[in-house]
Amino acid sequence: MKLFKYLFKLVFFTLFVCRQAIAADQLEIDDAWIAEAPPGSKVMAAYLEIENETSHDRLATSMHCQEFDRAEFHQTIETDGIARMEHQQNLKIPADAELELKPGGFHIMLFNPARRLQAGDRTKCNMSFDDGSTIDFELEIKKASVDDHSHHHHH
């Protein structure tokens, strides 16, 4: 009987781990980058693409980056020509689609960098989803272009 219980627990655990791995495999993060900020900046913006290859909507519920105290999902909303940012509890990634986080739209605000991050630097991050799965990835710091609306001085 002990062997049966042991095997049952082993199979259950294996299925649980495999389910999470399969769920994460059906989500992919590409083109992940942070706009380089001036020295002393306490807030930086990150952008990326999340591809959902599943047949159901997925929710990104949180994100953590090694070099930052905190990460938050935000969306830039323009009303009557005035842009403002709204904090988002989560990000919905539609089924069989891609969500692009880009300047002027959805993005990730990163707070209190541990050190000055410059173009070419990288930081390790992970994103958590509503089913308990996570994806590990890296963000690369890139020089912000003049037409890049990634300057978030009003946070």
Image (cartoon, rainbow, N blue to C red):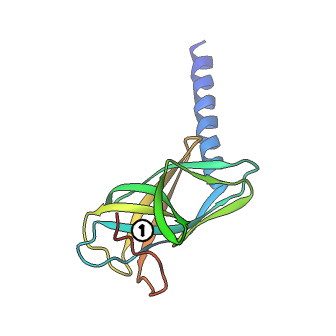
Residue at image position (46%, 64%) is 84
Q: Quadrant of residue 119?
A: bottom left
Q: In the depicted view, which residue is nearer to us: 90 or 155? A: 155
Horizontal arrangement in the rendering, residue 55 relative to residue 26 (left or right):
right
Residue reaching furthest to the top: 1
Between 153 and 125, which is closer to the camera in this rendering? 153
Q: Classify 10 Å Cα crowding around label 1: few (below 14), some (14-19), many (20 and above).
A: many
Residue type for callout 1? Ala
Name above or below for residue 150 compared with residue 3: below
Residue 77: percent from left, percent from top: 53, 63
In the depicted view, which residue is nearer to us: 114 or 75? 75
Residue that badge 1 annotates? 45
Q: From the image, which quarter does the N terminus lie in?
A: top right
| Image location (x, y in percent) of residue 146 | 44, 87
Q: How many numbered marks appear? A: 1
At 64% from the left edge and 48% from the top edge, which residue is drawn?
Answer: 58
Q: Locate the C terminus by quadrant.
A: bottom left
Instruction: Say if 25 sits above or below 98 in the image.
Output: above
Rendering coords of residue 15 (x, y %): 64, 36
- Quadrant in the rendering for residue 123: bottom left
Q: Answer left or right for 59 relative to 121.
A: right
Q: Position of residue 36 (x, y in %)?
A: 37, 78
Relative height, residue 147 to residue 26 (above, below):
below
Secondary structure at numbered mark 1: strand
Of all residues, the one furthest to the bottom in this rendering is 146
Please name the residue shown 50% across and 64% down the image.
Answer: 107
Residue at 53% from the left image edge and 49% from the top image edge: 90
